[in-house]
Structure formats: structure tokens, C-alpha cells
Image (spheres, coloured by chain):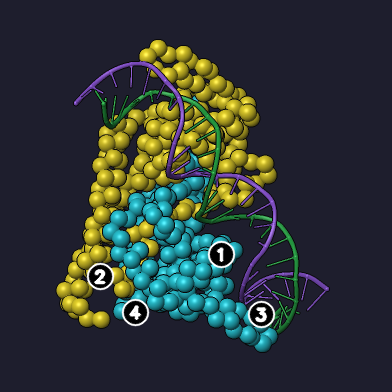
Chain colours: A cyan, B yellow, C purple, D green
Amino acid sequence: MAKKTPDGELPTTAYAVLGLVSSCETSGYDLKRLADQSIGYFFWSPASSQIYAELRRLTALGYVREREVEQERRPDKRLYSITVDGERALRRWLERPEVAPDVHKSLLLLKLFFGKATPPSTLIAQLEEGRRQILKNLADFEEIERRIADSEEHFFAYMTLKSGIVHTHAALRWVDDTIEELKDRSSMEPQTE
Amino acid sequence: MAKKTPDGELPTTAYAVLGLVSSCETSGYDLKRLADQSIGYFFWSPASSQIYAELRRLTALGYVREREVEQERRPDKRLYSITVDGERALRRWLERPEVAPDVHKSLLLLKLFFGKATPPSTLIAQLEEGRRQILKNLADFEEIERRIADSEEHFFAYMTLKSGIVHTHAALRWVDDTIEELKDRSSMEPQTE
DNA sequence: GTCGACATGTAACCAGTTACATGATTAA
DNA sequence: TTAATCATGTAACTGGTTACATGTCGAC
């Protein structure tokens, strides 16, 4: 995804952080949780250490500004907000027409693909673990949906959420079908190899 | 995905290569194309240079063996095949019950998520580019399906292929709906900001 | 008295990338 | 003669990770 950074451009993650900062002034710490609950579902959830690194880079570039806030009974923190330059850079990146293809990585599919010699019961257990993850996602999504549905303010978040929801439904149907098919198959020819 | 390599274990990519080698003797070069056409769709398509590096590592571990083949009117090549040790390691990995959650990375969704200030026409163009990518995938999948459907030999490949197909259909429906919704929206309030 | 939330960061590491080198053969 | 396919690899780099350090506060 945007591997060969075209001409002194920033890596995608930098824009992701910039985008999050653009909507409101936040600290690195809060940014981490924000990312986990939003773009983490369809793009990526960086480690805290990397968020801090990105913030330093964006500050150095003049894309965000830093404001120290002293707190009582809490560690001090630094709040970041986007600058005019930052807004321009973000907009320029957003408006680039090319969109690199999506990347999917599924350990479950990889193990299933090589599953010829795996005991069917193991495969089924792995699929059921995958199923639990799907249900967990679905629950998360439905909770977010309750919060943001039909609010004009969250229109774009809702569009991306819908993508997650339809994919998750598709995944659920697939995993159920596949578990069934494996069960049938292994009951038909028990231990024939 | 398998970030903290548990206890002297190999990274997932090493097992992916090992799995591909396990089904037949191949060269690094062929492996690259094999990966692109199979696990590339749901896991990963490594750069050639990395495939060669993995093959060296697997050879050093005794999981694959190397055989030099001299060719006329072609560069010589090295064919790799799995060893008994390699089969054992692969099986042990395949049978580990935990499956790390899937990872999705979508630049399109990221740009859409931050799309509040993007001109609707740009967003629609990006979505249409995404749509083309989906159709391309669907065409690939249907071609593969024609080759492997209902062949017992390709049972597991077919299961993973089906996952790709249902996801792609879901993605297509979503992208069409979203384009529609954006068109409606931008025609209703033309340039109101 | 210990754990988790808050808050920011350093250091070491590695997986994976791009760019490039090499060199023969074949098709346009 | 230019480019693509075959075939393997090196070198330099970077994005991102884990593990850890530091210190306060409130809850159990």
C-alpha cells in the first residue's frame, strides 16, 4: 500500500494520523484509542510508540502544532492540532485519484488453504475461533452504529462502517457454510487417508 | 499477525513458503508466480527477493532441500522440495489452534473516512476505481473457479476461493450503494459548505 | 500493596520493500 | 533493437514491532 512513496511524500500512516488530528486537538495517548476504535477496523492500529514518532515528524514538517498542557493529578500531556499547511497536505493527499488495492491478510485462510493434512477437528476449531472473532467485530460495529447512524456529522464514518458490516455478514455466512461442509466431509469418510 | 514470534518460531511468511513448497518441487521463480495466483489473494505476495531469502532460511533449517538443475537456453535453477523435518514443522504450525484475527487494509476506506472536505466527484472517482479493482478480482476468482471447482484435489483451495468470492460480492454491493448515496447527496445540496 | 489507567518516550530489532546487477533467449 | 521472460540474488532502507523505562493517581 503506497510502497514506493511517490516523490518525497509521506507514508500513508502519517496521513492517517494527520487525518485524525485534523478533526480535533488530541494527545498521542488519546489518538491511540481513537485509532483503535475507528480506522483500526479497516486500515491500521499503530503502536503507541509509532504514533508519537509520527506526531514528531508531523510537527517537524509544520503540519501539526504542539501545545503543552500541565495537569494536576495526571501526567502532563501534549496536545496536537493541525495547521493550515497540514490541512493543505492532507487535502492534497485525499484528492489524489489513485487508490492502491485493498490488502487482506487472513491466517485462518492460509491455514485452511494448506489444510489437506490437518485433522478436520482442528480445522473446525480454528474456523470456530474465526467465527468468534467475526461475532466480536459484528457486536462492535453494531454498537458503533447505534452511536452514529443517521447523524449527518458522522456520514463518512457511517459509510465505512457499513462496509465493515456487509463484509462481516458475508464472512459469517462463509464460515458457517464452511464448518458445515467440513463436518459433512469428515463424517462421510472417517479417517480415510 | 503473529508479531511476537512465539518461542523461536518462524514468521508466518516462512510457513507460507514452506506450505507452497510442500505440494511440489519448485524454484523460487515459480514460487513467486504460484504465490501471486493463490495465497496472494488472501494472505500475502512477497517480493521475489524475499522468497529467495526464505528459501535460504528454510534450507539452513533443513526444512527444504535444494537441487541444482542445469538448463540449456535458460539460466540454471534451483529446485526446492520439502523434507521430513519440514513436513513436521509445517504440520505443527498448521495445528496450532490460535488464529490471529484477520487484517484488512483499505486505502479507499481510509480516504472515504476522512472524506468530509473532499469534493464528491473525487470520492466517486475513487470509489469507481475501487469498483474496477473488485471486478478484476471477481473475474480472477471466476476463472480460478472454473479450473478447480468440484475437484476433490482442490477442496481446500476452493474453500478459500469461496471466501474471496463472497467477500467480493459484498464489496461490490457496498461500493455500488455508496456511489449512489454520494451521488444523491451531492445533487441534493450542490456546493453547500 | 498491587494493579490498571494516564502519558510519553527510547532502544533494539526484523520483516519486507525498492532498486539494481547479471545474463541468456525469444518474440515484436 | 527493444522489450519481455527466465532466474537468482545483493544492498540499502524503512515502517512498524516489542520490550522496557518512568512516574502519578485511584481503585480494590
Residue in view at x 41 percent, y 49 percent: A4
Which label sits in the foreground, 4 or 1?
Answer: 1
Mark positioned earlier in the residue sequence (3 or 4):
3
Mark positioned earlier in the residue sequence (4 or 1):
1
Badges 4 and 1, same chain: yes
Q: Badge 1 is on which residue?
A: A53
For disc 3, the neighbor class at 10 Å (few under 14, some 14 to 19, many from 20) is few
Instruction: Say which amino acid is labelled 2.
Output: Pro
Tell me the quarter of the picture where residue C23 sits: top left
Placement of the C terminus of chain B among the 4 image quadrants: bottom left
Q: Badge 2 is on which residue?
A: B119
Instruction: Give how far apart the Cα atoms at labels 4 and 2 are.
Output: 16 Å
Badges 1 and 2, same chain: no
Q: Which one is in front, A63 or B17?
A: A63
Badges 2 and 3, same chain: no
Instruction: Give how far apart the Cα atoms at labels 3 and 1 are.
Output: 19 Å
For disc 1, the neighbor class at 10 Å (few under 14, some 14 to 19, many from 20) is few
| Residue A153's disc number | 4
Q: Mark 2 lies on which chain?
A: B
Q: Which one is in front, B93 or B48?
A: B48
Instruction: Give how far apart the Cα atoms at labels 3 and 4 are.
Output: 32 Å
Find out whether the residues at labels 3 and 4 contact each other: C-beta distance under 8 Å: no
What SS does tag 1 mark? helix
Vertical comparison of B1 with D10: above or below: below
| Residue B118, horizontal then vertical, whole percent | 29, 70
Residue in view at x 38 percent, y 43 percent: B41
Instruction: Give how far apart the Cα atoms at labels 4 and 1 are.
Output: 30 Å
What SS does tag 2 mark? loop
Q: Badge 3 is on which residue?
A: A75
Instruction: Give how far apart the Cα atoms at labels 2 and 3 are.
Output: 41 Å
What SS does tag 4 mark? helix
Mark positioned earlier in the residue sequence (3 or 1):
1
